[in-house]
Amino acid sequence: MTSRDERRYPKLLRVPQIPDDAWLSQPQAARQLGIAVFRGGALIACGHLKPAENSAGRAGVTIASVQAEKTWRDSATYRAKTLRLLKDTIGFF
């Protein structure tokens, strides 16, 4: 079993490889957003966080997408959050 820091995305996803200074691991991104790692995976699946690999090929997300998500969460209204949850729930299935 591989550790979380060594996981990679499947080759079929064609995830871009970005510089290490623009990349965060999924657990690091979840900590910054104050959510569980599972929820971070759901945000990736719904397109709110952009998946990326660092120079070593490890799975993670872009720092820019984490910052955009954090900004959205801080400024979104209750209605916007509810609509997003509904849209994500429908789109996830």
Image: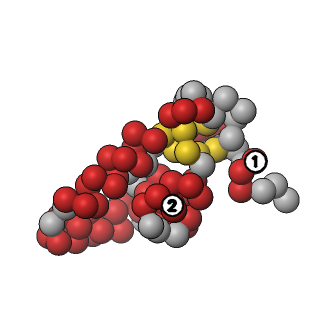
Disc 2 marks which amino acid? Ala
- Say few, some or many: other residues with alpha carbon within 10 Å of mark 1 (under 14 / 14 to 19 / 20 or more): few
x, y percent for residue 73: 28, 61
Q: Which residue is mark 1?
A: 6
Dot label at residue 43: none
Q: Give the residue drawn at x 40%, y 44%.
A: 65
Instruction: Tell whether label 2 touches label 1 (CB within 8 Å).
Output: no
Using residue 90 as the reference point, say whether residue 6 is left or right of it.
right
* Residue nearest the viewer, comparing 80 with 31: 31
Q: Residues within 10 Å of mark 2 (few under 14, many from 20)?
A: some
**Is residue 29 placed above or below 18 in the rendered structure?**
below
Of helix, strand and loop, which one carries label 2? helix
| Residue drawn 40% across the image and 39% down it | 64
Would you name the residue on which mark 2 appears?
30
Q: Can you tell which quarter of the image residue 43 is in?
A: bottom left
**Residue found at x 59% / y 58%:** 27
Please, is residue 57 above or below residue 59 in the view? above
Residue 52 locus on image (x, y percent):
55, 38
Q: Is residue 76 left or right of residue 6?
A: left
Q: Disc 1 residue type? A: Glu
Taking depth in this image into account, of 17 and 45 the one nearest to the observer is 17
Q: Residue at x 81, y 55 (%)?
A: 2
Q: Answer yes or no: is residue 90 visible.
A: no
Helix, strand or loop at label 1? It is: helix
- Where is residue 32 shown, x and y percent of the image? 46, 58
Image position of 65 with respect to 90: above or below: above
In three-dimensional space, the C-alpha distance between marks 1 and 2, rounded to whole angstroms, equals 17 Å
| Disc nearer the start of the sequence (1/2) | 1
